[in-house]
Image (cartoon, grey):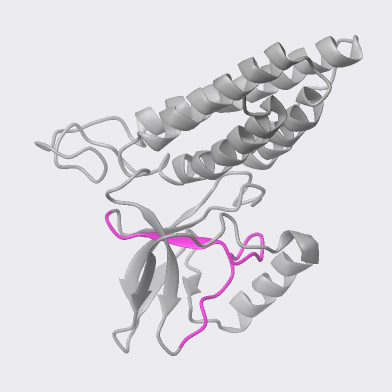
């Protein structure tokens, strides 16, 4: 039988990765048709991706309730502190769940792993999250891929099917706690670039952008500037 402690850790890692991918498409308009995300005959729909919003909201609330329940079960005291609603707080709650589950019995750990797996599955089956289209690592011929403007980590990913770039680092602070999405395009020389809300263009780095990147790096400890998720499988390379 597989160790349930390892199962919880593995399930938590998977949820963290796929939840970040789901968060990245929440602001993209979905359509019941040939729209960006769904496919089929295009018709008008609510702004944003309602399916992705539901999945993200369910997981965000669920892991917070799970953390509170484990704290009460393991420590024997009610958890009085309510985490904020940002993606970073959700990542912190998932990490806390892994630590708390280590002190629970095997049955509880198995249940925790199963619930984490369920939320992961809900995120993975979202159109626009689990291919095609898929999120892939960016490679630029002759140019260095810039880090995320908000967290300074090398975790920008491209979704070619949606024509967007997003940071998939779970603890990325984003813009006001919301994971921003950049739109793919080309610069004056015909090279691939992407534009963030507010007008910041990458990989062109001007004086304003440089100052913003320096400030972003200063907010993230060096140990946290790792690739997330690790580069596996296909890589997107362009000029």
Query: Within the magenta stretch, is there residue 73?
Result: no
Image-based side of 158 in relation to 133, left or right? right
Marks counted in the figure total: 0
For the question of whether residue 79 can be seen, the reply is: no
Residue 89 percent location from the top left of the image: 70, 36
Image-based side of 36 in relation to 79, left or right? left
Q: Looking at the image, which is closer to me, 48 or 161?
A: 161
Image: 225 above or below 20: below
Q: Looking at the image, which is closer to me, 75 or 49?
A: 75
Residue 177 percent location from the top left of the image: 63, 44
Q: Quadrant of residue 152?
A: bottom right
**Dominant SS type (magenta):** loop
Residue 144 percent location from the top left of the image: 52, 82
For the question of whether residue 123 can be seen, the reply is: yes
Image: 227 above or below 5: below
Q: Quadrant of residue 11?
A: top right
| Residue sitting at x 42%, y 39% | 26
In the displayed image of the protein, which residue is found farthest to the front? 1
Q: Looking at the image, which is closer to me, 54 or 77?
A: 77
Image: 8 above or below 184: above
- Image quarter hosting the N terminus: top right
| Residue sitting at x 67%, y 63% | 226
- Image quarter hosting the C terminus: bottom left
Image-based side of 5 in relation to 155, left or right? right
| Residue sitting at x 54%, y 48% | 179
| Residue sitting at x 41%, y 36% | 124
Residue 209 percent location from the top left of the image: 60, 75
Query: Within the magenta stretch, is there residue 147?
Result: yes
Image-based side of 99 in relation to 199, left or right? right
Q: Which residues are magenta?
A: 143-161
Q: Quadrant of residue 28?
A: top left
């Amino acid at each position: 039988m597989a160790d349930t402690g390892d199962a919880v850790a593995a399930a938590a890692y998977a949820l963290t990765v796929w939840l970040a991918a789901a968060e990245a498409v929440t602001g993209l308009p979905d359509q019941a048709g040939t729209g960006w995300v769904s496919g089929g005959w295009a018709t008008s729909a609510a702004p944003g991706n309602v399916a992705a919003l539901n999945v993200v909201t369910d997981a965000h609330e669920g892991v917070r309730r799970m953390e509170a329940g484990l704290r009460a079960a393991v420590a024997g005291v009610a958890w009085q502190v309510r985490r904020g609603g940002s993606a970073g707080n959700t990542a912190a709650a998932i990490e806390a769940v892994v630590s708390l589950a280590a002190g629970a019995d095997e049955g509880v750990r198995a249940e925790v792993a199963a619930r984490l797996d369920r939320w992961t599955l809900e995120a993975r089956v979202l159109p626009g999250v689990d291919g095609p289209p898929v999120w892939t690592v960016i490679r630029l011929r002759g140019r260095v891929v810039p880090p995320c403007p908000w967290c300074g980590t090398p975790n920008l990913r491209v979704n070619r099917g949606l024509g967007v770039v997003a940071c998939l680092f779970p603890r990325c602070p984003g813009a006001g706690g919301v994971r921003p999405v950049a739109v793919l395009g080309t610069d004056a020389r015909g090279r691939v670039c992407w534009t963030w809300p507010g007008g910041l263009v990458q990989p062109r780095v001007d004086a304003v952008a440089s100052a913003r990147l320096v400030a972003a790096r200063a907010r993230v400890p060096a140990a946290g500037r790792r690739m997330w998720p690790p580069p596996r499988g296909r890589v997107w390379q362009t000029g």
